[in-house]
Structure formats: C-alpha cells, structure tokens
Image: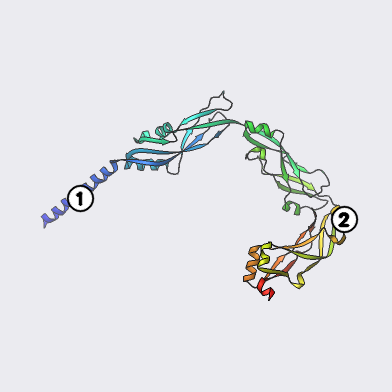
Amino acid sequence: MKKVLESIGTLLLVLIVSVLVWLYAEDANVKQYTNYAVSIEFQPPTERDILIEPNGARAIISFSGSNGQFQQLQERIRDRSLIYQLRFNPNDPTPEVEVDLRQVIEDQLLRELGINLTEVEPRTVTVRGEDLETVSVSILLDTGPVQVARKSEVTPAEVTFTVPHRVAQQLRDAKVVARLTDQNISQLIPGQDVSLQVPLLTLTEARGATPSSASVNVVIRQADNLARLTVDRRAVLLSYPPSLNARFVLELDEASRFVTNVELEGPRDQIDAIRQVAGNDLVWATVRLTNDEVESAADNGGTIVKTVDIVAPTGVRLVSEPLRVTVRVLPRLEAGS
C-alpha cells in the first residue's frame, strides 16, 4: 500500500512538473501577431497655447513576441492611448512636424517588453499646429416680434472665443446674436422690466469654438401697446397629405366645423390690420393631420381629436383656451356606398 501511494505521489509530481513546463513553453513560444491597433494622442507644447490637427492617430501594427509579452502589451494599452508631446519650431507661425509612429510605439511600448515590431501602418503622420487667440465679440439682441419700451440691458455685453489665428481675423467684426425664445416671450409682462436668460445662437465664423458663455442675462421691458381682438366665427380647414384622398374621406364633426370666440392678442398695429380686412381673412383656423394619425384612426374607431392651430400675423397669439375638434375618418369605399 505504501508503494502504491508513493507511485501515485510520483505520478502527480511528474504531471505537475509537465504542466508547468508546458505552460512555460507556451508562454515563451514566439508568435506573429498582425493587425493590432494602437492609439496615439498628440499633446501640444506646454509653452504655447496652440491648436493641433489631427490631435491623435491610430496605427495598425504587426509584431512578433511570446504569449506572455502579448498579454503584457494588452495590459499596457487597454483603454489607454500612448501620449506623444509635440515639439514645434517656435519661430514658425504655422508649424508642422512629421511624427514617426513606429519610433513612438517602439520607444513607449515595445522596446521595454522585448517585442519585435515588424510593420506599422501608417508609418508617419504630419501634425500641424496653429497659435490660438482669444477674441471678444459683441452681442446683438434680437427681440423678434417683441416691441420694447426702452433699450434692453444685456449682461455680459460681449463674450470671448479662443480660436486659431486665422479664424480670429474673421471674428473681429462679427457679432453673436442673443435671440428671445418662445419661452422667453411667454415670461414678458407689458410695461414691466423682466430679467431673462437668453441663449446665444451659434456663430458660424467661430468655426465650432465654444463661447465663454452660452447665454446672457437680458433685462427687457415689453412695450405696453398690445391690443386684443375676438374673432366671432372661423371655418376650420383640414390640412393633410393629398395621397390620403385615394383611401379615405376626412370630414369634420358637425359641431367642429367652426370655431367661435377666438381671442387674440398682439401688437396694436397688427390687431388693427386684422380688423380692417373683411371677414378677418388674416386669421385662419387649421387642423393638420399626418398619414400616421389618419391610418391609426381608421384602425381604431374612425375619429381623431386634435387641437386647432390658429394662424395669424407675426406677433399675434391665441390667448383664449386652445380649441379641440373631432375629425371623422371614413374608408373611401364605405363613404361611397
């Protein structure tokens, strides 16, 4: 029995040593690896405020090494990029440098691991730099349809952009627009100062550069020259894609063919213009329908309840409760039977 146990122990020891030898040989076995991606991030010189293009590169490499070396390589660059600090000629206003990607990868990654690099694509990348400048740009307030009683206060009066030198030249005479939104306009109180946060529109000349502020504070007083008008009766018009006519008949419920007592508010001159036109023809009541809405209604009861859009001159808005009407949807064959 003792000899049997000793034999089993010897066999287990031989097995363990064999496995270890195999693992070592497998780990040390040199293989060829191809089409492996390595990312390199370019950083500008620390002594200059400069824009670089491109700001990074992706190289596809082939190399030979053991499985153990390959595992170390993967660990080194997992979710990380190599960092290469650029060096430009300080006397060159638009400098550029050719970066040897093979050299960067060997120096920062492979030489220490003992990996033999056999191929890099691309081998080099040309990186261009351009000095950045900070430019102040004035803000132009666009109040849209709102008439103001006095000059509005805009804070700040200008914003700055940090852009390449060539773009800075185009910005010097530009203005960035702050335009009142529908939400801004809904907060106004005629005859009273109201403080609003008004967003800045994208400035095309800035070429995608971000302004120092995305919005400005505006203190604005809407002129108290508003007037109201009640439109007694307007026919409701249906607006929908013509292609629906071949398949459906769309008609308003009897009680929905007209809207009454539509109360409007707007600049006095616009309201006066509506009054002066016979039949208030500057005001329309419209229900807009889409293909999807009509087809869904045809499959689910044959009716659509929608809000009426009141179309009026610029600056004139509906102040009475929004009106809802019922539209019947009938298949064309059923309507003709």
Q: Is residue 2 left or right of residue 66?
A: left
Quadrant of the drawing holding the C terminus: bottom right
User: Front-most of 127 and 12?
Assistant: 127
- 23 to 329, vertically: above or below: above
Q: Nearer the viewer, residue 33 or 192?
A: 33
Q: Secondary structure at mark 1?
A: helix
Q: Residue at x 71, y 47 (%)?
A: 198
**In which quarter of the view is residue 329 placed?**
bottom right
Which residue lies under the disc numbered 2?
A: 272
Q: Residue at x 75, y 48 (%)?
A: 195
Q: Residue at x 70, y 68 (%)?
A: 305
State the scheme by which the image is colored: rainbow
- The secondary structure type at the circle numbered 2 is helix
Give the class, few, some or many, for how many residues have Cα within 10 Å of label 1's Cα (few <14, many ≥20): few
Which label is found at residue 126?
none
State left or right for residue 264 relative to residue 174. right
Give the percent coordinates (x, y) of residue 133: 63, 32
Whether pointer 2 and pointer 1 mark residues with C-beta atoms closer than 8 Å, the reply is: no
Give the amino acid type for the residue marked by disc 2 in the picture: Asp
- In this figure, what is the number of numbered marks? 2
Q: Residue 180's x, y, as percent?
A: 74, 48
Quadrant of the image containing the N terminus: bottom left
At which x and y percent is residue 298? 64, 70
Looking at this view, name the residue that lies furthest to the bottom.
337
Disc 2 crowd, CA 10 A, few/some/many (<14, 14-19, 20+): some
Query: In front: mark 2 or mark 1?
Result: 2
Q: Earlier in the sequence, mark 2 or mark 1?
A: 1
- Residue type at mark 1 is Leu
Where does the image place residue 233, in percent across and percent down from the top left? 83, 66
Seen from the viewer's position, the closer of residues 297 and 201 is 297
Residue where numbered disc 1 is placed: 15
Residue 1 makes an appearance in the image: yes
